[in-house]
Image: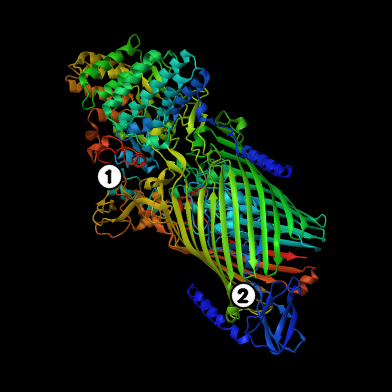
Amino acid sequence: MQFLPRRPFVALAALLVALAAPAGIARAQATGTIRGTVTDSASRRGVPGVQVTIAGTTRGAVTNDDGVYTLGSVPVGLTTVRAQRLGYSTQSRSVTVGAGEIATADFALHPVATVLSAVVSVGYGTASRQDVSSAIASVDSTAFANTPVASVDNALQGRIPGVQVMQNSGEPGSGISMRVRGPASLNAGNQPLYVVDGVPMIQGSLSQIALSGQDVTAISGLNPDEIASIDVLKDAAAAAIYGSRGSNGVVIITTKRGAAGKTKFSLNSYVGTQKVEKTIGLLNAQQYVELYNESAANDGYDPADYPFVPGVDDANTYDWQGAVFRRSPVSDVNLSMSGGGERLKFYLSGSNFDQRGIVIGSGYRRQAARLNMDLNATDKLFVSSSVGLTREDNDRIPGDQSLDGVVTNAIGMQPFVPIYGSNYGYGGRADGARYSNPVAIAAFNFDNYRTLRALGNLDAKYSFSDRLWLSGRVGADVYGINELTWGDPRIDRTYAQSANGVGRTASNTNTKYVAESFLTVEPLNQADNRLSVIGGASVEYNHRDLSFARGEGFPAGFSTYVANAATITSWDGSATDNNLVSFFTRANWSYRERYLLSASLRADGSSRFGADNRYGIFPAVSLGWNVTDESFAQGLANLATLKLRASYGVTGNQGIGDFASRSLASGTPYSAEAGVSATQLGNPGLKWETTKEVDLGADVSVLDGRASLIVDWYNRNTDDLLVRRPIPATSGYTSIWSNIGSIRNRGVDMGLHTVNLDGGTRGLGWTSDLNVTWNRNVVTALYGGQLATFNVSSRITSVAAVGQPLGEFYLYKFLRVDPATGNAVFANADGTETDSPTDRMFVGSPQPKYYGGFTNTFTFRNFDLRGFLQFSQGNKVFNMMRIFTDDGGCTWDNLSTIALTRWQKPGDITNEPRVSYDCTSGADVISSRFIEDGSFVRLGEVTLGYKLPDRLAAAARMTNARLYLSGRNLHTWTNYSGYNPDVNSAGIGSNVVMGVDYYAYPLARTFTLGVSAAW
Amino acid sequence: MRLTRALPAAALALLVVGCDNVLTTTPGSNIPADQIIVDSKSAQGALTGAYDGLQSLSYYGLDIQLLGDLPADNSTWVGTYQFLGDIENNQIAADNPEVTDMWTAIYRQIDRDNVILSRVPDVAAIDDATKKEVMGEAYFLRALGYSNLVKFWGAVPMPLAPVQSADDAANYTRTPVLDVYAQILSDLDKAAPMIGNTTDTRRATPMAVEAIRARVLFYRASVPGANAQADYQAALDAANVVLAGRDTLTVPFGNLFTATGSNTAEDIFRVSFTPAEYNELGYYWLYAGRTEVRPTKELASTFAANDLRKPYTFGPRTSGSSQLQATKWPTTIGAEHPHVIRLAEVVLIKAEALARLGRLAEAVDEYNKVRIRAGLPKHVLGVDVTTQADVLAAIMLERRHEFAFEGDRWPDLVRAGLAGTVKDLAKPGYVLFPIPAREVTTTNGNVTQNPDY
């Protein structure tokens, strides 16, 4: 970071030197020519676009498509020629030129694994990284392959600068929150747009059955094994090509395809075991009984009225957490076959992923198959298809916030209640339990979520010439979900018990059809002057059908299916649509490979917008300058390559309900008669949310590419926020969708890749990847400056307020425990103190000051070792479990061992108020006492691999075989007292509420043993 | 224009027209809000929708009853929602979600009445009989809504027409208490002659209008600035209209609170619920439910051992347990039909009005009807009760027992000036609920907060 400001100064100095230079080389003298071919040392093919220069001069040439260059008018004598290209290590060689002769200087350049080379997807096409002038991050499949998590977004955690991936919950297949360069929306979507092989994917949590914060995600339907690469369009200039859906960034996923040649088979498989990473310290029976009796004593109760009898009630302690957590297996098998001829290529794969949850009753299975075909139908017509089929089967458990939660009840249960007992084999009411038995819940209840998905597209490209072609695409994502849940009447203290069983069945079918075509033309295609322009149109149809029934009252022996229920108590049958019509164009111009210009424009019409605001226009422009290709920077070029980038773009967000802009009425029956009422106040002027972003970036590579840095500064202003603006309830409504308010995200994200030791093929090699993001998020405007509060489980937790980061915790402010009385002391807004607070205050932000990841990879002979650290610093977590596990004995919940440090006698100095039977100590007041530092450093992964010697592999007819042992979530360094500081019980649907831990499913520590082989 | 130019232009025009079609989507399960009242049938549908507003879990589905008791001395919070504990402790934050939701639900219901009252007169396709019936019942529902608001919050904003835009709502200010009462009585005056329904007690009847009129006058009498004696007399007159020829109280008491809400002779107006359109009364009160609240032991101790209402009011939460649960709503299914007002309340209103007017003997006779139904011995003036204060206290206790957990205790204490005696109020203003914080902020302070909050 530090040398960045110095760089322009160096460049400036180089410029001054270069300006003075021409006088010296104007002399006439005898000359010759140097000619040669630059090849890739690995592929032996010619490398186009290589800068070949005469050292110490500004003279140079660029290789053509075959890698051939010619340098004329070279002074006779010994000359040093340098060949340089991004993605390759620079090479110099000496050649003697005779007058009028042609000397040969061939180069074989070594490709270097630099982040600055590869091909990246830019939306409606691809580009070479060196031609890209906007902020795009790329992730290679090795970063997420063979990772024991259900969804690819989960595997990306900590891997991409500027992209914050929050796990929310450790439940297999559960929803992940991804924020590209900070949260920018209050009520509209905050997740990036996922585009798979050109088709925007159905995404989000589409379950109809709320399991209290335990979301699912449609992204989990994508098998990570099938993915070749992921590119994240981060800045608005890059994402603007996706217009009204670009403002949260775009994740472009490219699946694997076949290559011509012998049919290749590959196998990737692992098996593993998982266990909860950490449990919470809870009181044992003696401590529990002592504490509750002390609470009665503190409030002046007669010892005869104490709730428990020591020595009797606390005879046994049962480990309820131990009863609900288990060691559980995870496995993945993926087999693929690819190959074909020059005309027809294919990639076929199938996989089975099976993850049982670390909490009893939970588990996730996915079977996926993919067939990708590429056909050169004629010389002019190229056709390809990509089809992925997925089946998921997810056993969810109700979690967070639910009285029927497994983890929830395991924490809340009194420690003396036996796990097994008289109620159908389980401990229950007769054994003194105040809550439902979580082991019985897991045994008798289920919440099954099954999906079937077909995601695919058919592409055709027709070339009118090598400079003009037309692309057409039809794509579809068809995603059907069936849900079946059962609340068993055998479980004490549940609603299902009093209702004689509750069965729910839900199904919804989501379809998305996309048709688009675009024309690509390259009016200029010389190596040093290239211009390509695309223009096209797209139409997208989205439809969703829903049905749901909830039945109660089942005859003995029946369960699950509502067909046998006595009453249907709730139902649904409805449909919803939204459509999108878009026109887009983009021009990329590259002059002498030094000056890059890209400009794009998209017009999006969305049926979601108000009738008065149907079309949004989203322009973008970006500039790039390969500084070290300049002749004046030749001296510098021996040391480094530098590209400067600047971009500006406008993107939108339309992540609102399909009919949010309309005034609507709904059926509101009464006494079994049909009724109707207006239920939504419309806003015909409703439009997209607008993000304007400036990005200034630099791509730096030094030491022949052994260290490369991509760093960006950005300033994103999101205006016209789509806000469900609160209005006075006297209107009959509580909110109206409006475009109001602004949020700013400003920050720096950087990725540094270094080759610390280049071990060649056999020696010790060491590479490091570090990515860090500093983001400052602030709400800059809201309607009338009015702050808006947000709840978890009916309790206000978070706020959007001008001048504060989004999601700032908004609670009463705890000051201390009064050493004299043991009561909690809180602050009033005016600075005075109180024991019954009424003024909420800003008490901490869930957003980190910085976050990122650090990966180190070592290779030695046939071994490879990879370690991955993930970190997040400065974020606060509202440990909302503590409103019960640290409430001073106000409910009958078991308490956290934090309560052992409680105030017990006058003079005690502590932050734990005295325990109080009548809840008078302030311990149960929901306050900043429960805000904890959520900073963490996590050893996210350590993998040790061993590549079978070629000799052995060949004996088994394999071209490649590797065995590996991998550990995930091995350790988390944190001061957070709950399971996992990387948490959000509000789930992926939540924008403002972040970092709230309300009995979230904990994280698994996983060990896997895997093999990957190809033959 | 040459054809070569016209063709692309035509193609473009087709494309744009086509796009407009693509972008015009129709909600599958809604209709546009301005289409709800177009003829007689839809006007009746809108009225049914207005009744649906009563079913909200934040209105007669739970909160009117729960929040009418919890700040008083009948019930105590034992569950997991701390904001209910705040209500019990009379330490209600202005953003208390339960209080906010009740306010919201009542205004949402009133808005449906306002939509009917403002649109129905102008739709020619509605026949006159329907117009009359629908508007009469809507006037009644609006009066009921404001009577609840004024009881818990005092002066409140009083929209009498549907909101035209979001910004309109920000301009409402609070209407003084007596003006709200005047509007309520004016609505009831309009409703009475328009309502033809006399049999279905799940809907407004002329009898329900009179009963609510009696209650409204009875409550207004204790408002500062009201003409108390005149209001008690008027309440008495209205009660007499209701009671003329029907003073049979249902026996046993439990028949008023059956799981499926069977009709009784005592019904005047109840809100209908089914397993699908359920209330959460039992779910919140019963041990089989989430048990957020339970009766106070103090309440239990004030019941005579042989009070026949007792077993239908509370009992041990499990057999043999010393812990209590309220049993007035017998199931967690929520298909009971809670009473908005029933004959016993009119009897006790009449009794108290008589007592307030100094007619003590008649008052004792009147409230004895309730005691008889409860299996308790009749009070005798001069023996069991002597002074006006005695009689009023006896009536207050009868009301407490008769309507326990039905949401009358707190308004009764406040009305009688006893709230600060029975409960330890940190500030005198806490007899009223705070105006929801959202209302104050979203109106930029046009709606002011109640004193002491």
Specify few, some or many for label 1: CA neighbours under 10 Å numbering under 14, 14-19, or 20 or more: some
Left or right of residue A309, residue B18 in this image:
right
| Image quadrant in which the C terminus of chain A is located | bottom right
Question: Is there CB contact under 8 Å for labels 1 and 2?
Answer: no
Query: Where residue B51 sits: x, y (%)?
Result: 45, 24
Residue carrying label 1: A301
Indicate the quadrant where residue B197 lies. Answer: top left
Q: Is residue B138 left or right of residue A113?
A: left
- Estimate the spatial distance between the alpha carbons at disc 1 and disc 2, rounded to whole Å: 84 Å
Mark 2 residue type? Asp
Q: Quadrant of residue A98?
A: bottom right
- In front: A854, or A939? A854
What's under tag 1, amino acid-wise?
A: Tyr
- Residue farthest toward the top in the current orientation of the protein: B245
Where does the image place residue B102, in percent across and percent down from the top left? Answer: 38, 34
Pick whichever, A594 or A674, lies toward us: A594
Q: Secondary structure at mark 1?
A: loop
A1014 vs A891, nearest the viewer: A1014
Q: Is residue A328 visible?
A: no
Q: Secondary structure at mark 2?
A: helix
Q: Residues within 10 Å of mark 2 (few under 14, many from 20)?
A: many
Which one is in front, A441 or A260?
A260
Number of the label disc, if any, that sits on residue A643: none
Quarter of image, res B426: top left
Residue A279 versus residue B90 in the image, above or below: below
